[in-house]
Image: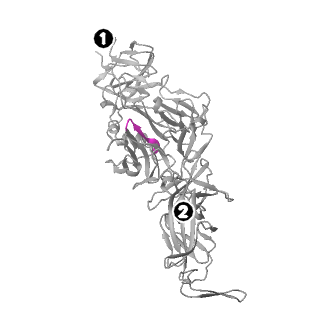
Amino acid sequence: MAAITLKAFSGEIPNLPPYLLPTENGQAVFNCDFAQKDLRPLKLGTVLNGTAFPSPIKGIYTEEGTNFFTWTTETAAYKSPVIGETYGRVYYLNSSGMQVAQYSTATSSGGPPSSSWLVGVPTPTAAGDPDPYKVKLRIKERTSLPDYPTISVNVDIWWESNGVQYQKQTGVTLTSVTDWKSYSFTVPARTPYNDGQTATTTSTSGGASTTVAPTGSPSGTPDDASLVAHITIKDTSVTPNITFFDVTVSSGATTPTQNLVFPGGVEIALTTDGKLSFVWGVMETRAYTYTVTNTFGEESAPAGADVIDVTYMQQVIINTKTPDFTGYRPYNATKIYRTFGTAPDYFNVVVASQATTITGTFEFLDSTHKASDVGSVLISNEFYPPESGMQNLVALPNGVFAAFKGNTLYLTEPYRPHAWPYQQTFPNAIRAICTASQSLVVTTAAGAYLLMGSQPANMQQQRLPIPQAGLDPKLILNIEGAVAYASQDGIVTVSGSTASLNMSQQLFSREDWRSRYSSILTPGSTARMAYHDGFLVLVDSASALGFIIRLDEAAGTYTQFNQQFDGMFYLPVQDTLYYSVGGYIYRFRNSGYYTLDWQSKDFVFPSYTSFGAMYVRATASVTVTLYADGVQYYQFTAATTGYYRIPATGLNGATVTPGFALRWSVRLQSQNLIQYVTLATDMKELKDA
């Protein structure tokens, strides 16, 4: 009767001793795939580039698997989240900072982008008092009424006393001293006044005199008469003309005459020597600022603002200074914003450029004076470039990028990767971050957190109920909506607001985990994790320590995978995991096979046992090694499916006597499928195998 039968196979369970393993589990397993419960080797990767890229490749990015960006430093890269993206931008973060390039420059030869720029738009601000970039304002007087381009002005002049007009002149010609501020005109000459009851005598320059007899009616100009002007302004652009300004002003008025038809009002004064003046009141107090844009159309945070009082007959000239764009996408334009009325918002205004002779300084004339003339509201109040020294760039599903530095997490404005206005501070240094289905997992030096919220502005922190610290940005990943990260105690999985070591503890005790992997699982490690097609893959570029845990069809099966990869990159659109070794890039599990190596549990018998026959069902050759009481006993190659004898002489030439060993195991090595293995004491017991 057969003593050992293996019809199903599975991976290692390192926290169980070899003799306590279930029958299908192995005590030493390498490069095995247990998706279908039989014993299969993992597929090899297929090299993509026949000629090596710049080496070693630590960062990989591709959008179709043909053209690549590659970097020799650790680099995280993502496609632009901008809605309606037209530039084909790729944003990436490495030790050189946060940068942006255009994917059109990626080639089949790899290498970093041929052209790239620092992410963001320089903010026109600088330390110091005064800030050299603060907006500067000055007034320019208007020479015409802004709302009435076509007008007619009529001025009638007379002397007036006790309500009686004297020597009235209509349509008087005004001579402008300063347009819409001061004018002069010819005053009607006074004549001697006769009240009609008293004779008056007028002397001439020659000494002669003329006496005017009383007439009974007043004549001439009374001595106490005031000069009066009646001003009428009509809008002649419409028919019939509309009178919109009609005011009478007297030189004898004790206070200036006011009219409020224009915003801010106007005071009109008249003097007896023919001077007419307009004093315009303050229409509004305005605040101005400006931003700059680059040739991607991205906008900076605004410069320091300033305020100015403006009348109806004034315009504002705005002086701006362009910040240094060295390293950034080139400067494109300056946008002017100002307030209207008492509202706090700034609105974009259309301006005309003014000549300037100072390099980097521009002047603009704001000719707007009503809200209907303006454009969009200023939204870039905190659109600052990313912080230097950040690491671990990740993309959230709502068009947001996140990265961290120290204990501070930085986030972008949604769908505006150039703008980084949001921050979240944690009690301890951040070790790694990763997106989950509806949240961001943040691992720190003292536990992990969830960051939840639909927008960066309202995200809230929630401490996860697990003390295990994260280790490194390369040792955290998304697994179909959940997050897994490596810790000193095992692999922590986070699903929703639940975090646990359950999956890891089914395979490893804390001691097993640390004894195997503590040398590579540290902050700044060269190890990295990736996920593909149900496989959680951990490899190290500096040592042959790694594993694969299959999480889907054969949940939790573990095989050692001692390959050394320098970089990995998952492309969701093709469901492809790319990895690099030196200067070459491969597609993971694509063609050909590794050599599987699977050693069974220790089968312990109550009495000494020996085996003389074996049946192997496989698609091609298998190397079989038998171990007796932990010592290699016999090895042969099963060329194909069939029955094989096990000689009574072991490898050391000793004759095996009945009851040779109590503990037996079998080791199978092959690049082929193995379906069934059974051992028996002799051939007769295998007849039904």
Q: In which quarter of the image is the N terminus?
A: top left
Asked whether residue 380 is in view, the answer is yes
The residue carrying mark 2 is 233
Residue 68 vertical placement versus 37 (above, below): below
Q: Report whether 370 appears left or right of 213.
A: left
Task: Give the label on residue 688, or none.
Answer: 1
Judging from the image, what secondary structure is the residue with disc 2 in? strand
**Where 202 falls versus 648 (above or below)?**
below
Mark 1 or mark 2: which is in front? 2
* Image coordinates for residue 4, horizontal then vertical, percent: 32, 20
Q: Tell me the kind of residue under disc 1.
A: Asp
Of residues 139 and 561, the one drawn nearer to the viewer in this rendering = 139
Q: Give, as a three-letter code, the residue at label 2.
A: Ile
For the C terminus, the quadrant is: top left
Q: Who's the residue at 54% across and 78% down the image?
A: 226
Q: In the image, is residue 117 above or below residue 12?
A: below
What is the x, y in percent for residue 340? 48, 59
Does the rendering let one see residue 303?
no
In magenta, the rendered stretch is: 472-481
**Going 42% across and 19% down the picture, which residue do you hit?**
673
Residue 169 horizontal side relative to residue 261, left or right: right
Point 41% across, 49% down: residue: 456
Above-or-below relation of 153 to 430: below
Crowdedness near tag 2: few (<14), some (14–19) or many (≥20) residues, C-alpha within 10 Å: some
Q: Residue 263 carries which label?
A: none
